[in-house]
């Protein structure tokens, strides 16, 4: 295994990749806005939510999974490789996919905030989409983002990536975002199902797990798929661990955070009698579960050949999900 003369700076690593994703999203939006078939107000509503300030966690996971399996299975290009830098050839493989994942995530936030569901008026530190554009336009913007996401993967994924891989990714995205995944999780949340893990796995974990799995699935080296089945399985399992950790941390922030810090209305879960990990197991139980998930996630990475010391980004992102304050 190669060594590197550079240590990973996570702030630099995430900043560069986040900026690359946002630059790619900006180019996509500009193209849409020039399409005279797209109503101007619809394009504005889509832009408002898609480009609102966010962590781009799911896009980062997609890119990180791609980078990780390529470096583990094929070796870095040089012993002086600086993993803080974004490798353009790797990014091109999953750029469209990462942007499409952000479109699906933006759709889910728009729809979740609607009065018929969570009825929230703040998201990412600004007024929610339906507050600005009205409920009907918000609903339509979310619908349009779903379909644009599929179109973007088909159109934007380079020809060097196998068509079979692209088709499999689209199928799995439809599952993760649909009735067995995010939509189903929202239903269980709506009817206050007491199986809180199922709610979190489907509503949050499904897209996070997909982000990791799909980034590795499209990773290509010398025109061949790079990830092994063992790694793909491990990344999917790791995604559900990370997704559950992220949601439990979110449940805790709803109790202890402020609108200035978390960017949305705190206390909404308790006020709406929402089923959360905290409401079922209490704050101590939630924190204990987070500790278990950190250990479980690290073991999954180790056991599925996903640990790469010079690029510990997957471990770092799990740690961030557990310890985050915003």
Image: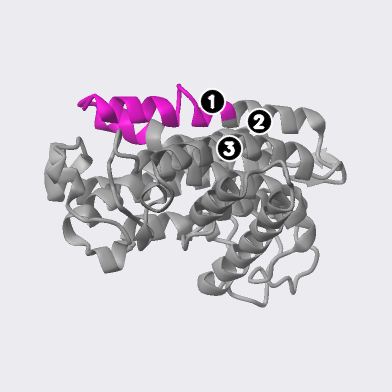
Label whose residue precedes the other's in the sequence (3 or 2):
3
- Horizontal and vertical percent for residue 8? 57, 71
Residue wearing tag 3: 144
Identify the secondary structure beneath mark 1: helix
Label whose residue precedes the other's in the sequence (1 or 2):
2
Label whose residue precedes the other's in the sequence (1 or 3):
3
For this rendering, which residue is in front, 321 or 166?
A: 166
Q: Residue furthest bottom?
A: 5
Identify the secondary structure beneath mark 2: helix
- Horizontal and vertical percent for residue 5? 67, 77
Residue wearing tag 1: 175
Mark 1 packing: few (<14 Cα in 10 Å), some, or many (20+)? some
Residue 170 numbered mark, or none: 2
From the viewer's perspective, is 66 left or right of 273?
A: right
From the viewer's perspective, is 179 left or right of 278?
A: right
Question: What range is drawn magenta here?
Answer: 174-201
């Amino acid at each position: 295994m190669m060594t590197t003369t550079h240590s990973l700076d996570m702030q630099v690593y995430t900043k560069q990749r986040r900026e690359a994703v946002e630059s790619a999203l900006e180019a996509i939006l500009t193209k849409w806005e020039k399409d005279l078939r797209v109503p101007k107000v619809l394009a504005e509503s889509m832009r408002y939510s898609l480009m609102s300030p966010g962590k781009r966690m799911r896009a980062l996971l997609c890119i990180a999974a791609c980078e990780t399996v390529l470096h583990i299975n094929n070796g870095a290009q040089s012993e002086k490789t600086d993993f803080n830098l974004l490798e353009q050839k790797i990014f091109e493989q999953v750029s469209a996919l990462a942007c499409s994942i952000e479109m699906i995530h933006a759709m889910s936030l728009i729809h979740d905030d609607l009065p018929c569901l969570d009825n929230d008026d703040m998201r990412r530190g600004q007024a929610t989409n339906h507050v600005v554009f009205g409920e009907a336009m918000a609903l339509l913007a979310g619908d349009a983002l779903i379909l644009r996401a599929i179109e973007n993967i088909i159109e934007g994924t380079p020809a060097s990536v196998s068509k079979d891989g692209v088709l499999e990714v689209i199928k799995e995205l439809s599952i993760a975002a649909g009735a067995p995944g995010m939509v189903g999780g929202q239903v269980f949340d709506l009817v206050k199902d007491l199986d809180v893990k199922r709610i979190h796995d489907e509503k949050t974990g499904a897209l996070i797990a997909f982000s990791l799995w799909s980034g590795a699935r499209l990773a290509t080296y010398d025109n061949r798929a790079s990830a092994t089945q063992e790694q793909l399985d491990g990344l999917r399992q790791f995604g559900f661990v990370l997704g559950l950790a992220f949601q439990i941390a979110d449940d805790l922030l709803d109790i202890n955070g402020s609108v200035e810090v978390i960017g949305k209305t705190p206390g909404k879960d308790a006020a709406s009698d929402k089923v959360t990990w905290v409401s079922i197991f209490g704050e101590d139980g939630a924190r204990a579960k987070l500790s278990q998930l950190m250990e479980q996630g690290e073991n999954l990475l180790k056991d599925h050949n996903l640990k790469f010391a010079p690029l510990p980004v997957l471990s770092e992102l799990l740690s961030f999900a557990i310890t985050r304050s915003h």
